[in-house]
Amino acid sequence: MKDIPKLGLGFWQIEKSDAKRVFLEGYEVGYRHFDTAIIYGNESEIGDAIKELKPNREEIWLTSKIPAEIKSYKKAKKAIDESLERLGVEYLDLMLIHAPKPWVFMFMPGPRYHKGNREVWRAMVDAKKEGKIKNLGVSNFNVNDIKNITEYSNEPIYVNQILIHVGRVPKEVINYCQNNNILVEAYSPLGVGKLLKNEKIIEMAKKNNVSPAQLCIKYVDNLGTIPLPRSRSKKHMENNFHFDFKLSIEDKEQLDKMKI
Ligand SMILES: NC(=O)c1ccc[n+]([C@@H]2O[C@H](COP(=O)([O-])OP(=O)(O)OC[C@H]3O[C@@H](n4cnc5c(N)ncnc54)[C@H](OP(=O)(O)O)[C@@H]3O)[C@@H](O)[C@H]2O)c1
């Protein structure tokens, strides 16, 4: 079984007009892990890039996500088939349930859609049996959302993709996942770009001879999570690809305490 590359290129907010170029440039830089979602609306253009590049399928890792609004077996099954069609591939390396609740209710109290998430999971398990998905995962799930799946199914949750960056480290869910053999992916590791303007981060990056983006990526990597930075600039992609430096204990502690 292929290993998940420990850095991924994010595709949220990458316009259709940019997606093919971003994929091809990302590949050229060295990225082999690409993170999209049905809702991002750029699967077809990523598919165009794959068609043009013709990489060995084993060489690239493709993740997509079933929209948070889909909570039925039938709709999930259809969504998986359409995603494969748009990407023009035989299988996805990873398919995630994008969120436990439809986005409009996501940040409100109320039902967690436990029944619906089990239905979507069942469709993903069946798709895995058919060879359409290699690994199944979730996103934005809390510990109870995760238990709802693991108490229902023997199929392991491979990944939980959650919001993690300096100033936003949800320890409970990270620890739970890491203690239960669920990989954690860090989305928005640059705080959607906001962290790069933070004075303390700029200063610490300068001291370490790295860019603010490299510092932020290193921070989530140090937590044992997989960073998924996004960029539409090749220069930034290159910069983000290299974060092979050591963060001192003092710097790490300072970043841990940072309020953003
Ligand atoms: N599962 C979920 O619900 C969920 C939610 C959000 C995100 N995600 C995933 O996580 C990925 C990353 O998160 P994100 O898109 O929120 O943003 P992010 O990676 O935290 O930040 C992206 C921003 O940082 C800028 N940037 C990147 N590298 C830079 C560099 N080296 N120097 C200066 N600026 C730089 C980018 O601008 P330029 O384009 O100009 O470089 C862009 O404005 C997404 O694309 C998506 O794949 C998942």
Image: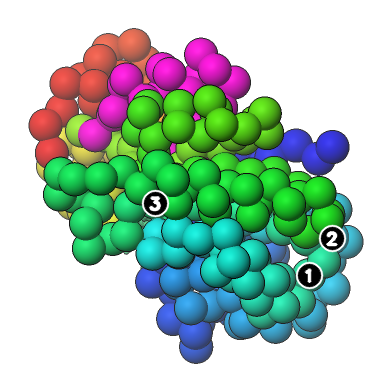
Helix, strand or loop at label 2? It is helix
Question: Which residue is label 1 attached to?
Answer: 89
The residue mark sitting in front, 3 or 1, is 3
Residue 153, how many percent across, how many down?
Answer: 62, 32
Q: Quadrant of residue 73?
A: bottom right
* Dot label at residue 40: none
**In the image, is 214 to the left or to the right of 86?**
left
Mark 1 vs ligand 1: CB below 8 Å: no
Label 2 CA crowd tier, 10 Å (few <14, some 14–19, many 20+): some
Q: CA distance from mark 2 to mark 3?
A: 27 Å
Q: Is residue 51 above or below residue 149?
A: below
Mark 3 = which residue? 99
First reached walking from the N terminus: tag 3 or tag 1 = 1
Q: CA distance from mark 3 to mark 1?
A: 24 Å
Is residue 212 rendered to the left or right of residue 108?
right
Q: Amino acid at mark 1?
A: Val
Judging depth in this view, the residue of 7 and 243 nearest the camera is 7
Amino acid on which the number 2 mark rests in the picture:
Arg
Quarter of the figure with the N terminus: top right
User: Cβ of disc 3 within 8 Å of ligand 1?
Assistant: yes
Q: Which residue is mark 2?
A: 57
Q: Of label 2 and label 3, which has the lower sequence position?
A: 2
Q: Mark 3: few, some, or many residues within 10 Å (few <14, many ≥20)? A: many
Q: Position of residue 103 (x, y in %)?
A: 28, 60
Q: Earlier in the sequence, mark 2 or mark 1?
A: 2
**Span colored in magenta:** 168-187
Q: Is residue 180 magenta?
A: yes
Residue 119 position, x and y percent, is 54, 51
Screen quadrant of the C terminus: top left
How many neighbours does mark 1 have within 10 angstroms: few (below 14), some (14-19), or many (20 or more)? some
